[in-house]
Amino acid sequence: MDARARDVFRRIVETYLETGEPVGSRTLSHGDGLDVSAATIRNVMADLTDMGLLFSPHVSAGRLPTEFGLRLFVDGLMQLGDLTDGERRALDVSAAPGDGDSVLEQAAARLSGLTQTASLVVAPKSEGQLRHVEFVATSPAEALAILVYEDGRVENRVMSTPADLPPSSLISAGNYLSARLRGKSLGEMREQILGEVASNEAELDELTSRLVRDGVADLTEGERSSLIVRGRGRLLDEAAEEDLERVRMLFDDLERKRDVIDVLNAAKGGEGVKVFIGSENRLFSLSGSSVIAAPYRDQSNAIVGVLAVLGPTRLNYARIVPIVNYSADAVSRVLGRAGGGE
């Protein structure tokens, strides 16, 4: 693109992100700083459409940026805004030593409030010491794993089981795991237990061994992170009537927490803020949503989680990117001082 086309394109995207409406040549020609005729602007818009950067929702309507156009804008043409002192104060969090959970809850709430969107935080999940493990059949091929922790917490997780598993195997598997996990966490005993089962040191029958092996794998795999979601209702606040189905699909996506965590963890690979627009991420592609995410660090300067904003593709990227970046830095500073995040 030449300088004129870049200027027209940038103004179209900025106007769309502000209004949510298609942008026409007349609107641009009446704006400040663009000293060209409406006819010239229409020609430039036609060229940008041919390049796949713009599209027209209706024959007589103005133009909207495509996802490809939004990506080009975010990567090369967007001018980031500066945070005010008030915005920085609104994002600053605090916590007592070891109280990392409080820091992340604060950050999620403040980020949602300042951006008026939903906020997501992937947090390292603390592994508690267990007191008792029990399996209860709920269907011919499914069981409920009941985990009782030393601090009194009880956690129930549904898992698949062999269809021909007898009740005695459920009891034996629970007794075996309870004996080895008392006072320990699943994570620290995982390899030892799987090793005993593989070498038959556990002295369990085949079906019980399979239940223990699959159970330990299911209960520990992917459970090292938890998801904090704040501001779901804000996704409805700005939604037009035609957007309600998109928001409903987005709510459905958010219920699939494991998949959400996987998507956000993609932002761990490197420094700074990552922006995922629309179909660029598989989970939120149908709901046409964008995610702006940044990793945060613990007291050892290791990346341990991700903080993000979720909303329609018509987000104010120039404002929200620095907000997410500052919020992640604020969390990292506090966790570094307080020794949280473990």
Image (cartoon, rainbow, N blue to C red):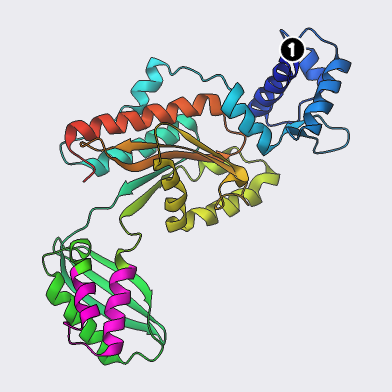
Q: Residue at x 29, y 91 (%)?
A: 167
Q: Residue at x 56, y 52 (%)?
A: 282
Q: Position of residue 252 (x, y in %)?
A: 54, 57
Q: Is residue 317 left or right of residue 303?
A: right
Quadrant for the N terminus in the image: top right
Provide the residue span drawn in magenta: 192-218
Q: Is residue 52 left or right of residue 61?
A: left
Viewer-proximal residue, 331 or 251? 331
The correct choice, above or below, for 72 with respect to 128 in the image is above
Q: Position of residue 62 (x, y in %)?
A: 81, 29
Three-letter amino acid code of the residue under disc 1: Gly
The correct choice, above or below, for 201 with respect to 56 in the image is below
Viewer-proximal residue, 76 or 105? 76
Viewer-proximal residue, 203 or 33? 203
Disc 1 secondary structure class: loop
Q: Is residue 94 visible?
A: no
> Disc 1 marks which residue?
31
Whether 65 is among the magenta residues is no
Q: Outermost residue, front direction?
A: 199
The correct choice, above or below, for 95 with respect to 283 in the image is above
Whether 199 is among the magenta residues is yes
